[in-house]
Amino acid sequence: MTANAATGAMTIALDGMGGDQAPEMVVLGAEIARTRHPEARFLIFGDEARLAPLMADHPRLAAATEIRHTSEFVTSDAKPSQALRGGRLSSMRLSINAVAEGEAQFVVSAGNTGALMAMAKIVLKTLPGIDRPAIASFFPTLRSESVMLDLGANIECRPEHLVQFAVMGAVFAKSVLSLEEPTIGILNVGAEALKGNDVVK
């Protein structure tokens, strides 16, 4: 299954076993996504014996979903290095591989964030000129919407990393939020002169 340019269809690879309430909440999330994006298709990687009964409760979702069985998954307390070495057949790694192999356009996991970032960087790589991946989210503002990154992966950043985050945030704002000329700022922990580290100040 791949994206169809004529129909705008997209395929999303899901880590079916990632997250504290997986796989139930993964299937519920996919059902919401399917409702909002009826053209979407899904590859769910995980324990088929647990996923199949859940999918049976969502026939519309099941019709647009392929379950890829694996009994392995990355635990929430696994170190990224441990997940990289021992998680090659995990639901997280296989869902990332689906994007690398062109079977899906997106990968979604609610699992171990450090492991997800490490695996994605190894398998999918970063774009030229980008050293660090960044976690991003967006939220409504009085005028439109705003993108914020990096959310959680990098506590200390060099100036060049802040520039890279700004570039990625601007591209996200243009391509996903359709903002033609996004403005960019650095968010500090407060407005007082003493707040923040030297790089931010």
Image (tube, rainbow, N blue to C red):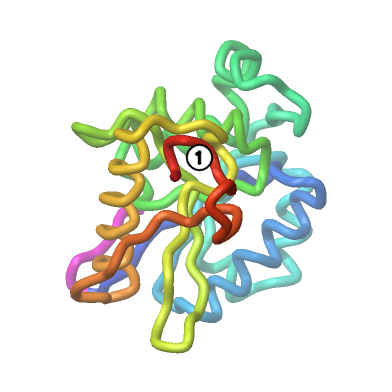
- Answer left or right for 131 relative to 146: left
Secondary structure of the residue carrying tag 1 is helix
Q: Position of residue 135 (x, y in %)?
A: 49, 47
Give the labeled residue for mark 1. Answer: 95
Q: Residue furthest bottom?
A: 142
**Dominant secondary structure of the magenta stretch?**
loop
Q: Residue furthest front?
A: 193
In the displayed structure, would residue 112 be above or below residue 145?
Answer: above
Asked whether 16 falls inside the magenta stretch, the response is no
Q: Which residues are magenta?
A: 1-6
Closer to the camera, 173 or 79?
173
Q: Residues within 10 Å of mark 1 (few under 14, many from 20)?
A: many
State the count of labels. 1
Going 47% across and 59% down the picture, which residue do you hit? 148
Q: Position of residue 108 (x, y in %)?
A: 53, 50
Q: Quadrant of residue 87?
A: top right
Q: Position of residue 143 (x, y in %)?
A: 40, 87
Going 53% across and 52% down the picture, which residue do you hit? 193
Going 50% across and 39% down the picture, which residue do you hit? 95
- Answer left or right for 72 relative to 145: right
- Answer left or right for 197 relative to 170: right
